Amino acid sequence: MLNRLLAFTLFAVVTVTGCQSGQKTQTSASRSDFNVYKLRGKVISTNAAKGEVTVDHQAIAGFMEAMTMPYKLRDASILSELHPGDVITADVLVPQGASGDVLLDHIVIVAQAKPDYRPAVSYHVPAQGDVVPDFKLRNQDGRAIHTSQFRGKDLLVTFIYTRCPSPNFCPLVTRNFAAIHKRLAVSPALHSKTHLLCISFDPDHDTPDRLRAYGATYIGSDAKDAFDDWDFAVPDKPALLEMAKFFDLGITNETDETITHTLSTTLIGVDGKVVRFYPGNEWTPEQIVADVKQSLPVA
């Protein structure tokens, strides 16, 4: 995602989710069936009959140049929440190896054209220097922890849930955290000044025991000290909502089997302030380790 736009009428960022009844865009494919790209642009018009929004967008890295074109929405029920002039970011879903519509998903309004429009929930895109609130969670040992207890270390935070079925989402992010964990362990100076935190957004299912078992598969051990520098934790539902809003985490279309969600990873510095925000799954372990080294210069 590009740097947060400081809009003249908007100081919060809002994620558009389909909370009302309405026809979905006709696709039953999971997000793992698509290549995902990032879009930023301005809404030109909407077409309820076709379930489309026309966007004048910037170049989409790895996909296309800047242009104005219509896109179908993965969830057409949210179309009424978009207005000409809105500045948005979104995931562009491009079908893998088969014909089909290019879809927009996880739309975030970063500047509203209608100042009198008030969405149900306002979301914040973490920016460098933002102070992270002291969120409370319960970790894989059933012990209460909170984000401020890691002051004095770089804290790397991401969001997952253990039932996630898509290999390119939660499992990929957790594997990348495991790679970061191994790279940091090579340098005792870096290792002692960093902590990893995977936060579940599935408090109904992700019990401490389940989080511990999930974490052990990536850490490679269930020993007592295996989680000393990497916690797997879950907040209660009220805290989860506040965390989702602060870390720009979209959670929609929850069912008994799956949760539709965005991806959110944040590097928090020793002072409890955001160093860098990594949306999506395009970042690499090497990139984050380099950012940690820059944030924590050690001999």
Image (cartoon, helix red, strand yellow):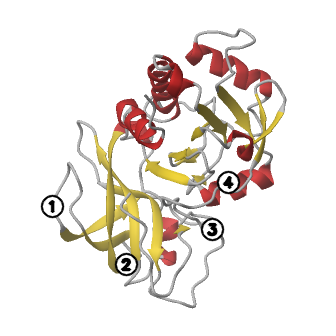
Q: Where residue 101 sits in the image (x, y, percent)? A: 29, 53
Q: Residue at x 61, y 32 (%)?
A: 195
Identified by mark 1, the residue type is Glu
Q: Residue at x 33, y 66 (%)?
A: 40
Foreground: disc 1 or disc 4: 4
* Neighbourhood count class around disc 4 (C-alpha, 10 Å): few under 14, some 14–19, many 20 upward: many
Q: Where residue 34 sits in the image (x, y, percent)? A: 34, 41
Residue with the mark numbered 1: 65
63 over 217 or under it: above or below: below
The answer to which quarter of the image holds residue 193 is top right
Helix, strand or loop at disc 3?
A: loop
Rounded to the nearest angstrom, the CA distance separating label 1 from label 2 is 22 Å
* Neighbourhood count class around disc 3 (C-alpha, 10 Å): few under 14, some 14–19, many 20 upward: few
Of labels 3 and 4, earlier in sequence is: 3
The answer to which quarter of the image holds residue 7 is bottom left
Of labels 1 and 2, earlier in sequence is: 2
Helix, strand or loop at disc 4?
A: helix
Rounded to the nearest angstrom, the CA distance separating label 1 from label 4 is 34 Å
Asked whether residue 254 is in view, the answer is yes
Number of callouts in the render? 4
Rounded to the nearest angstrom, the CA distance separating label 3 from label 4 is 23 Å
Residue with the mark numbered 3: 20
Residue with the mark numbered 4: 243
| Contact (Cβ within 8 Å) of mark 3 with mark 2 | no
Helix, strand or loop at disc 1?
A: loop
Q: Where residue 109 sits in the image (x, y, percent)? A: 47, 71
174 over 17 or under it: above or below: above
Asked whether residue 29 is in view, the answer is no
Residue with the mark numbered 2: 46
Residue closest to the far left: 65
Q: Where residue 170 sits in the image (x, y, percent)? A: 52, 33
